[in-house]
Image (cartoon, rainbow, N blue to C red):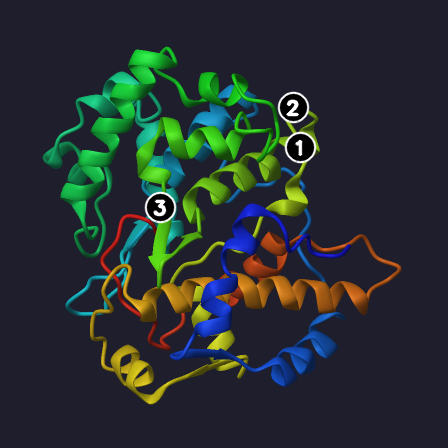
Amino acid sequence: MTVRWQSPVLSSLRPVIEQASLVEINKDKLIQVANWMAYEEFAKPDGSMLFDFGNDPDHLMDFTMVVNTMNFAFTDFHSGVKFETDYLGRRWCDSEAMLACIHRAINAGTPLFSGDYLAKLTHDEFARVFSGTIEMPMIDERVKIFNEVGRVLVEKFEGRYHNFVRSCPPRLYAGGDGLLERLVVEFPRFQDVSQYRGSSIQIYKLAQLGIWGMHLALSPRGHWKLEDASDLTAFADYIVPVALRVMGIFEYAQELETKINSLEEIKRDSEAEIELRASSIYAIALLTEEINKRRPNFEPLLMPQVDFRFWKSYHATHWPHHLTRTIMY
């Protein structure tokens, strides 16, 4: 499979890739990584989930979209400590800790997938549901987002995300009516776009991740399948740049390296932050293409599969990642 470089997200990255001064992609290192990573086994969509949320496709749609409404910033911005929680006899970290909290809440009867509940959610109730080793960062922002999303769900979609999903064709792009196209309009919290030297850079991390999550959970069961999944990109966050840096694919200007290693906040929509995110997506696209060239007899990998290979290996690492206070990742 050849990466469709003219897709809306990938094509929007070109101004960053051509002008970046703080993040450089070492293509020789990328080729070296592709040479050995091509022989690894990559996870395929099989319907399995970290926690059991049942088999009802509508319920799983609700779950996946609620998760990605709040799937951002699990590291304390002052201490660098990650959010963790104890559940089912073990300690969960980062976004997996969030999933553990959601599973615990649903099993306790909390109507977390209801638009009416989300619209009325309070700070104290959120803190109770998402309790862990530290207070989950940015609680006030999360509550505000849930309140706004809940109101839209109640007013337009009978209180449930699955009604929105089923009102769209199962495609990212469909002349403005695609699931991704509508999601970022109907729910502004997913409008993940940055301005870089006069150009609009489309990232759409959480919107794409939510759609991919539904495809992962539902397509193997025959309930719902994203028809243009090959257009999904990597999900630009804090973790993928760490993996790319450790493997030598990313090279940073010294000023950026110092900021990251000293846990100094990198401002949202700064050139450094945009270069980190855009370069992550672009590098994973390049790497996916190179890996697929080396596996002609295998089913082509999708970019989210390569992204997950990095995220799973590095999301709990002690290696410092950049810190940006944002609701987008």
* Residue under the image location 31 percent in, 51 percent down: 86
**Label 1 secondary element:** helix
**Precedes in sequence: disc 3 or disc 1:** 3
Look at label 1 and name its amino acid: Ser
Front-lying residue, 21 or 313: 21
Contact between marks 2 and 1 (CB within 8 A): the answer is yes
Q: Which residue is mark 1?
A: 219
Work out whether residue 190 can be spotted: yes
Instruction: Give the CA distance from mark 2 to mark 1.
Output: 6 Å
Look at label 2 and name its amino acid: His
Name the quarter where the N terminus is drawn.
Answer: bottom right
Give percent across and percent down for residue 253.
37, 85
Give percent across and percent down for residue 263.
23, 75
Which quadrant of the view contains residue 33? Answer: bottom right
Look at label 3 and name its amino acid: Asn
Instruction: Give the CA distance from mark 3 to mark 1.
Output: 22 Å
Give percent across and percent down for residue 152.
30, 20
Contact between marks 2 and 3 (CB within 8 A): the answer is no
Q: Which residue is mark 2?
A: 223
Work out whether residue 314 can be spotted: no
**Label 2 secondary element:** loop
**Label 3 secondary element:** loop
